[in-house]
Amino acid sequence: MARHEDLSDKSSSRFEDISRPGRPSSPPHKDMEFLRALKKDVMVAREQCYLRGLLQTTKWLSELLYCVRDVKLDEPMPSSHTYYDQLGEELDHYHLAKSYFDLKEYDRCAYFTEDCTTDLGKFLHLYSQYLSGEKKKNEDIVDPLVTNDQHKGAYLKELHTELSKMYKQHTSSAPESGEGEIDAWLLWLYGVVLKRLDLTRQAVEVLCQALHLEPLHWGAWLELAALITDREMLSTLKLPDHWMRKLFLAHTYLELQLNDEALEIYTGLQEAGLSHSTYIMAQVAITHHNQREVDQAVAIFNELESLDPFRLNNLDTYSNLLYVKEMRVELSHLAHRVVQVDKYRVETCCVIGNYYSLRSQHEKAVQYFQRALRLNPHYLAAWTLMGHEYMEMKNTSAAIQCYRQAIDVNRRDYRAWYGLGQTYEILKLPAYCLYYFKQAQKLRPNDSRMLVALGESYEKLEKTDEAKKCFLKAHSVGDIEGIALMRLAKLYSRLGEGEQAAVLYERYLQETEDADRCEDRGQVYQFLTSHYLQKNMLDLAYDYAQKCTLFMETRESGKTMLREIANRRQHIEQNTQDDCGSVLVSRVRPRVSHGGDRSAATRLPPLNLTYTP
């Protein structure tokens, strides 16, 4: 798998050396030059974001700055009071409007900044208008499953008109004229509006311009990452050469399910001196979660809890891990803890929803996922998990609606595509299944579950060659559920290709020797008994028939076949003696074989289990 591209900026030249694959296993050392550059940049950017009310980015930068609190700068930072001097007569307007903004009185903030001419005042005016429209739209949602786009034509279009006018003035005017200027923060807001209006290409262009002007705005990086559809699109972006680019690439790789590349960057950043960053630790845990390395992910989340016991970010992912492991006690403790911290956070609602789901109280689980969506209609995890709950409740129409909403929020969510495929599988619509499973497999090309589901859809549509390829590839990439060989063998058996089916069944028995798959093994023994009985290889048929009697569902058929084997042996012995008149003659005369070679290589034709596309 290809690695991420090298980033050659002056703040991280030494960092590249320690993050390169194949580095020696020497103790990690901090890159002080990189850390000092990071601290200087973050101190300035944090204040800029705080002044504009970008609270999430301010919190993210503050947590990053806390990790480098022990790093000493070569020279003291300049005083920040000079920035307030730039506001001039608008200083009082700004403080009044900012106080309203902090209290989420966005309409009042927009009203008192309407006549502002400074960049900060104009940003606060337009940003408060945007947040006011978002707040009103969310408050009007009665049922999360019913989409309501009536506000999209109001506040977003007004903002688009005003910001596009400023943007055109900025691009058409000469740089030295200073007229019609639009700064990085207004460019970011313009990009957000374009994204919400589904003008993706323009949004990507504007957000890239904003990042070149202000590469430390993490919110702009996140908005851009949400628009990246694949690795090819990512490689075409013109991004600034800045250390923040590494964090963006790692985040985007994780979104694109390129987990090895993401983990490589995060490991390099940790070794460079950000080992105590709670954000990076959580991202590493999510990487292990995507790779189904559940124990490692749980261990990292436990460490995060010890470092910051009141941190709620990413605890929805942690609750998913506990759900998969069926750790009921731990999930119960987590649910009680997050309620005590903040019961009105989307992560809290998701944790409680998973808790009720594990207890098979699916109606209550749906209630909490709906509560999370009232708090944030764009909360991806709640849409997907609520779809799963509706599937458990046999409400396929609601499940389909949830999965479609999840895809609208993030088209890279393979779980939603896979859930849609499963839903249409229940509805017995294999052509629809095929489409949705294909989308899921594109996002997770080496996930055997996607491949097996795709193969089953092909099989139902009588596309047997494609089905064989899917099952074979699922086995080649590492069969998570251990069913690919069984599905492939059953397909060969159904097509009347008994020799190939027998090879696959015996391979399946070898690979699942230590697994607890009693019902599957009984069926396999039954097939092999019948197969070797048909070929008159009685010794092998006898061995497998004996094993059939060990399983409840195949016990009677095993006994029946044992009687058939005994009758055939008796008949063969009688025919041999009657034909020759003497047992001595039979020693020099060829005899009908009923034992056969025990070696699978000689009794069955070879079958290549290596996948070739």
Image (cartoon, grey):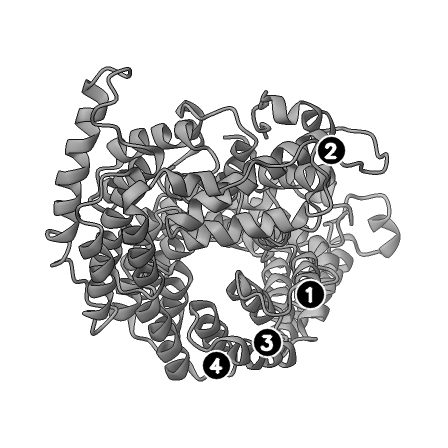
Which of the pair 227/578 is nearer the observer? 227
Q: Disc 2 or 3, which lies upstream in sequence?
A: 2
Q: Are marks 3 and 4 in contact (CB under 8 Å)?
A: no
Label 2 Cα neighbours within 10 Å, binned few <14 / some 14-19 / many ≥20: some
Q: Residue at x 78, y 50 (%)?
A: 598
Callout 4 amino acid: Tyr
Residue 182 screen position, x and y as percent: 27, 31
Q: Which residue is mark 1?
A: 302
Q: Residue at x 49, y 75 (%)?
A: 342
Q: Disc 3 or 1, which lies upstream in sequence?
A: 1
Task: Using the rendered image of the protein, determine whether residue 463 is visible from the camera's viewpoint.
Answer: yes
Q: Residue furthest right?
A: 584
Residue 122 screen position, x and y as percent: 25, 43
Callout 3 amino acid: Leu
Q: Are marks 3 and 1 in contact (CB under 8 Å)?
A: no
Q: Give the foreground label among 2 and 3.
A: 2
Q: Are marks 2 and 3 in contact (CB under 8 Å)?
A: no
Residue 523 screen position, x and y as percent: 58, 66
Q: Which residue is mark 3?
A: 334
Cα separation between marks 3 and 1: 11 Å
Q: Are marks 1 and 2 in contact (CB under 8 Å)?
A: no
Q: Give the foreground label among 3 and 4.
A: 3
Cα separation between marks 3 and 4: 12 Å
- Determine whether, in the image, residue 144 is placed left or right of residue 279: left
Q: Disc 3 or 4, which lies upstream in sequence?
A: 3
Kind of element beneath mark 4: helix
Q: Which residue is mark 2?
A: 32
Label 4 Cα neighbours within 10 Å, binned few <14 / some 14-19 / many ≥20: many
Q: Residue at x 56, y 24 (%)?
A: 5
Which of the pair 572/9 is nearer the observer? 9
Label 3 Cα neighbours within 10 Å, binned few <14 / some 14-19 / many ≥20: some
For residue 356, the mark is 4
